[in-house]
Amino acid sequence: MRHLMSPLDFSVEELDRLLDLANDIEANPSRYAHSCEGKKLATLFYEPSTRTRLSFEAAMLNLGGSVLGFSSADSSSAAKGESVSDTIRIISCYADICAMRHPKEGAPLVASMKSSIPVINAGDGGHQHPTQTLTDLLTIRSLKGRLGNFTIGLCGDLKFGRTVHSLIQALIRYPNVRFILISPEELRLPDNIRDGVLRKNHQDFCEEVRLEDAMPELDLLYMTRVQRERFFNEEDYIRMKDFYILDREKMKLAKEDMLVLHPLPRVNEISTEVDDDPRAVYFRQAQYGVYVRMALILTLLEVEVC
Ligand code: CP
């Protein structure tokens, strides 16, 4: 039995197969419509979510399976003090696979150790968000035609943004990826990723404060919101929240084929006037999230589709 805690849990070859499967699901959805009949997915969300939880649920329903779960800690027995370890033992009696989001780093890993069903980390604190990374990789590969040989700008809250941490770890395994890390001083990438991942792997990267300076070089721009829920005080959040606003003027500085990604939700960091720009692909990215989660469920449940 396999779990998914980090994007590195899959080899590059396994990831290629998963992304191929996701593309096939996109092209031939009816072929997969009954492949999980009789199977149940539990979504255990101790933190708010729109895309991740509902795309997991849509993915399982598209595969002919069923879903159950909770969408906040308050509506589960966590509110009475039940541990994650006990909860997963119970859920293992009710479902065949589960996706868990939790504010504490490592909580899904703890659950996986007590679970008799595959556990998927759907985001743990500021640590990892591996299924967002699968979504990002599928989006980039489908729309750019390759993973590797590009310059990617990661912009915004690089300190608390778990999607960025997971994406960097995944992308360093592909050739010739150059990272431009664009953030205010206070929201720079944590040392464990800058030194422990980028420097350790001799990765080409630089740090910038001004988005405008990086724009002309980028093949991909990955925008992120400032993570209000991870700040210790509201004053700091208010000071930081509008540090970057991508608008039409800034888009004029970009290459004609640059793509703008964002894991969403957005707050103010991308002006809505950018939404109609053909280079803005963040809503398509959310759709790719359904295909890749369908592929992930099939892979972890070891369902073969003829
Ligand atoms: N991208 C993402 O994780 O969105 P949600 O928080 O809405 O799930």
Image (cartoon, rainbow, N blue to C red):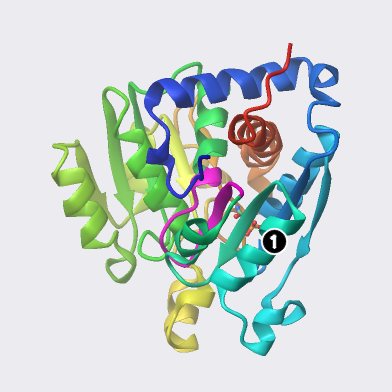
Rendering quadrant holding ligand 1:
bottom right
Q: Residue at x 69, y 61 (%)?
A: 91
Secondary structure under the numbered disc 1 in the rendered image: helix
x, y percentage for residue 116? 59, 52
Q: In this view, does 280 lie to the left or right of 25?
A: left
Give the percent coordinates (x, y) of residue 25. Answer: 72, 21
User: Closer to the camera, 44 or 177?
Assistant: 44
Q: Give the range drawn in magenta.
A: 117-132
The image quadrant that residue 9 belongs to is: top left
Q: Where is residue 15 in the image (x, y as percent from the top left)?
A: 47, 26
Quick check: is 123 in the magenta stretch?
A: yes
Q: What's the amino acid at mark 1?
A: Ile
For the C terminus, the quadrant is top right
Q: Mark 1 points at which residue?
A: 91
**Is 166 rendered above or below residue 305?**
below
Q: Which residue is drawn at 38% across and 25% down?
A: 12
Front residue of this view, candidates 227 and 50: 50
